[in-house]
Amino acid sequence: MRNRQIYKQALKLAVPMMIQNGITNMVSLIDNVMVGSLGTEEMTGVSIVGQLIFVFNLAIFGALSGPGIYGAQFYGQNNIEGFRNTFRMKQFICALCLMGGLAAFIFFGEPLIGLYLRGESETVNPVLTMNFARQYLSIMILGLPPFVITQIYASSLRETGDSIKPMTAGVASVMIDIVFNYLLIYGKFGFPALGVKGAAIATVMARFAEMLIVVVWAQLRKNEHIFLQGIYRTFRVPRELAEKIIKKGLPIFFNEFLWAGAIAALTQCYSTRGLDIVAGINISNAICNLLNVVFVALGNAVGILIGQTLGASQYDLAKKNAFSLMWFTGAVCILLSTALISLSGTFPEFYDTSEQVRLYGQRFIIITALFFPVQGFLNALYFTLRSGGKTFITFLFDSVYSWTVTITTAFLLCRFTSLSIFTIYAIVQSADIIKVVVGYIMIKKGIWISNLVDCEKGENAV
């Protein structure tokens, strides 16, 4: 606690992100409970589609992260033209990701959903589940373009240290989502009762509202956010910088995409033990995702603060702050674990499902909560390594490890052992302890410390 100034800076950045993401996840939780009140098939279908869209969302975050590393360092260097170029690169990269995502969901959506419906269950109808999932996905894809545009603007604003306005837009969109979920799922105040279709329509409306608020607000305040002045006069990016961003960004993009795919693959492995397992994991994820926004936001703050410090060539300070923030994040997660375990018995009761599914949900919540400190510390490690541009190391450290160790372990245990699903789930969670040890050694050695934008100084600096 001797380094209180860096904690204040981290919280100043992270708290608005926690609020925005927390409210967004609260809406997801409310959506989940509302849809869960319709039946287990509706809840399971929506959760499967949510898992697939999660892969797309993480791919967008990964696409933004490469330019974001340079953006944070350019801003720390006061290089506005360099910052503009990172914004333009985000547009190019995300446009390609959007086209790929839309094509995947339109042409391969049903086969992807079918991967999760191979387990047997006495209480969940796979045909009905597929029908509800298909309905939900057909509408949700309309919300992908506004989501992408919002993330381009919001990520750039955060790299300048402004996380308040993206939070405000997130709060507004959440209110829209809550109101129209209630109206359209249940058919209140003269609106039609559309069930899962209503949940999807409300979410798409919220995506468009959030986009309009963020983009219009930012464009009207160009005097404050100077990088937006003349941002669309040209779409050209210096070739040398574009190549550097792509070189650093590709490992992050593939890392986020493959890591999200690994999470989806994990759920698919667990689903072979029965569709009830998928429903139970959905209940667990709904509440756990609400609380993990704390360490995710702190991780993002770590990346931005350490990146700015590296851009200013303050290497000793960057290393000192990195260690302080890692331990701080781990300590905060102990409090989150306590809160989550205390809610584990109550939260599943909100769902209109079988007692067996509720029991699964409760136990998955407890196991996930026990490993929250590990995940928080690991998240801070990951963003510290990434802030110095060690993107290939983070690629190996994160997604490659997940596919080679985590997924392989889950697959073998689920298919070839008689261990209970809870024991398997705990073993898979504990595999991340190895990454914590390896990551900590790398941070201590300082191999991540580098200034990526030092050579970009010159006539572009202001």
Image: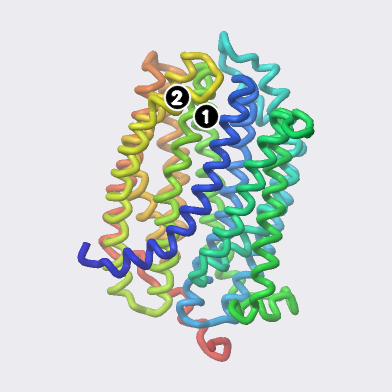
> Circles 1 and 2: CB distance less than 8 Å?
yes
Q: Residue 140 versus residue 234: which sits nearer the camera?
A: 140
Answer with the quarter of the image where residue 52 lies.
Answer: top right
Measured along the vertical axis of the image, is residue 431 above or below residue 152?
A: above
Determine which residue is flagged by label 2. Answer: 361
| Residue ID at (67%, 43%) | 203
Counting from the top left corner in percent of width and height, residue 185 is at 69, 31
Measured along the vertical axis of the image, is residue 89 above or below residue 281?
A: below
Measured along the vertical axis of the image, is residue 312 above or below residue 388?
A: below
Under mark 1, the amino acid is Asn
Mark identifier at residue 85: none
- Indicate left or right for 460 with 425 as reference: right
Which residue is outermost to the front? 189
Determine which residue is flagged by label 1. Answer: 282
Q: CA distance from mark 1 to mark 2?
A: 7 Å
Counting from the top left corner in percent of width and height, residue 248 is at 52, 64
Q: Secondary structure at mark 1?
A: helix
Counting from the top left corner in percent of width and height, residue 163 is at 51, 64
| Residue ID at (62%, 81%) | 223
* Residue 247 visible here: no
Answer with the quarter of the image where residue 426 lies.
Answer: top left
First of labels 1, 2 by sequence position: 1
Under mark 2, the amino acid is Gly
- Indicate left or right for 1 with 457 as reference: left
